Image (cartoon, helix red, strand yellow):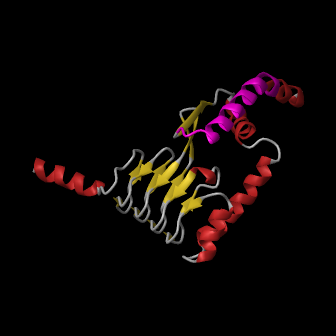
Amino acid sequence: MILITLTTIFDMDKNRIIQLRGQLKKFFKSDKRVFVFEVDSELPDRVKFIYQVVFPGILKFKFFLVYLIARLAQYIDYSPIKIFLYRLIGIKIGKGVFIAQDVILDPHFPCLITIEDYCIIGWGAKLFTHEFSNNKYRVGRIDIQEGATIGAFSTLRGGVTVGKMADIPYGTILYRNVPAYSKPMQILFKKLDENA
């Protein structure tokens, strides 16, 4: 009975899964910033549905390998080995980039992360190319342009571009683009001073 139920659920979602896989492949080949799809399966089948779209078949094992390499790199203090491991899994990293220890570069879609020359990514920063909320699965590119600094323990959401030489302070949650040469916290403090 359980096998019949799971098979029936898969058959009902099969066409939608195939359609979403095709759309996701097109997204990877495009220059679009974000791809979102609704997860409209039953609650117990939600994770299974996502994995069937995002990591079908053998891709699931490739993801596990990428995940292990990313975790290993995460715990290595700055070194050329760390940069090599991140490049190995598909992250585009320029020259002279510093990535501190405990930085999480999302292993789900590492090919969507670009870190240009001479950037600094501070301790414990997190760059997420995927997220799930409100029954929507969201995939997005992250571009950190030349010389930008991402402060320690900051979080970047997929779809964000950090402009050239921008300075993102400690603990910032970025869900919008940051223009080149900007310092977001300085703008906030100026506004607070004006209201005082």
Label total for image: 0
The span shown in magenta is 10-32
Quarter where residue 172 is shown:
bottom left
Q: Is residue 144 left or right of residue 183?
A: right
Q: Residue at x 44, y 57 (%)?
A: 145
Q: Is residue 166 above or below residue 78?
A: above
Q: Residue at x 60, y 31 (%)?
A: 37
Q: Where does the image place residue 75, in percent across and percent down from the top left?
A: 60, 72
Q: Nearer the viewer, residue 51 or 142?
A: 142
Q: Nearer the viewer, residue 111 or 95?
A: 95
Q: Is residue 144 left or right of residue 132?
A: left
Quarter where residue 47 is shown:
top right
The quadrant of the picture occupied by the N terminus is top right
Q: Is residue 97 above or below residue 40?
A: below
Q: Where does the image place residue 173, in percent across and percent down from the top left?
A: 40, 52
Q: Is residue 171 left or right of residue 42?
A: left
Q: Where does the image place residue 192, in percent across and percent down from the top left?
A: 17, 51
Q: Residue at x 20, y 55 (%)?
A: 189
Q: Is residue 61 above or below residue 22?
A: below
Quarter where residue 69 is shown:
bottom right
Whether the magenta-drawn stretch holds residue 25 is answered as yes
Helix, strand or loop for the magenta stretch, by majority: helix
Q: Where does the image place residue 17, in percent across and percent down from the top left?
A: 73, 30
Whether the magenta-drawn stretch holds residue 13 is answered as yes
